[in-house]
Image (tube, rainbow, N blue to C red):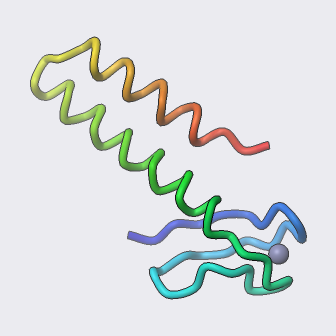
């Protein structure tokens, strides 16, 4: 899975492919931002799984977590 994230320091768009976790332009460490994005994707997938199993309360909670993690300032 490829994750794209914008650097908060220089605003460069970076693509994470599992090997690079620093900004391609300013070399800022983006580890925490990638982790947030990853957890957001994970929660979205978990939401789908809960819906498939008709667990709507758990799906709603998981979706809220995903939405909160996906917010970019
Ligand atoms: Zn940067």
Residue 45 relative to residue 5: left or right:
left
State which quarter of the image contains the C terminus: top right
Q: Which residue is drawn at 42% across and 49% down?
A: 41
Q: Which residue is drawn at 80% across and 73% down?
A: 12
Q: Relative to the observer, which residue lies in front, 21 or 72?
A: 21
State which quarter of the image contains the N terminus: bottom left
Relative vertical location of residue 36 with respect to residue 68 in this rendering, above or below: below
Q: In the rendering, at what x and y percent does residue 54 appear?
A: 13, 17
Q: In the rendering, at what x and y percent does residue 34 appear?
A: 57, 63
Residue 19 relative to residue 55: left or right:
right
Q: In the rendering, at what x and y percent does residue 43 appear?
A: 38, 40
Relative vertical location of residue 12 with respect to residue 41 in this rendering, above or below: below
Q: Residue furthest left?
A: 53
**Number of numbered callouts drawn:** 0
Q: Which residue is drawn at 49% across and 87% down?
A: 19
Residue 22 relative to residue 66: left or right:
right
Relative vertical location of residue 20 with respect to residue 66 in this rendering, above or below: below
Q: Residue at x 57, y 40 (%)?
A: 69
Ligand 1, seen in the image, is in the quarter at: bottom right
Q: In the rendering, at what x and y percent does residue 49 appear?
A: 19, 35
Relative vertical location of residue 9 with respect to residue 43 in this rendering, above or below: below
């Amino acid at each position: 899975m490829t994750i794209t994230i914008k650097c908060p320091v220089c605003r460069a768009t970076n693509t994470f492919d599992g090997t690079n976790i620093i900004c391609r332009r300013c070399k800022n460490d983006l580890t925490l931002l990638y982790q947030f994005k990853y957890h957001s994707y994970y929660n979205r997938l978990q939401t789908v799984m809960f819906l498939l199993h008709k667990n709507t309360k758990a799906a709603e909670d998981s979706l809220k977590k995903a939405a909160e993690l996906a917010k970019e300032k």
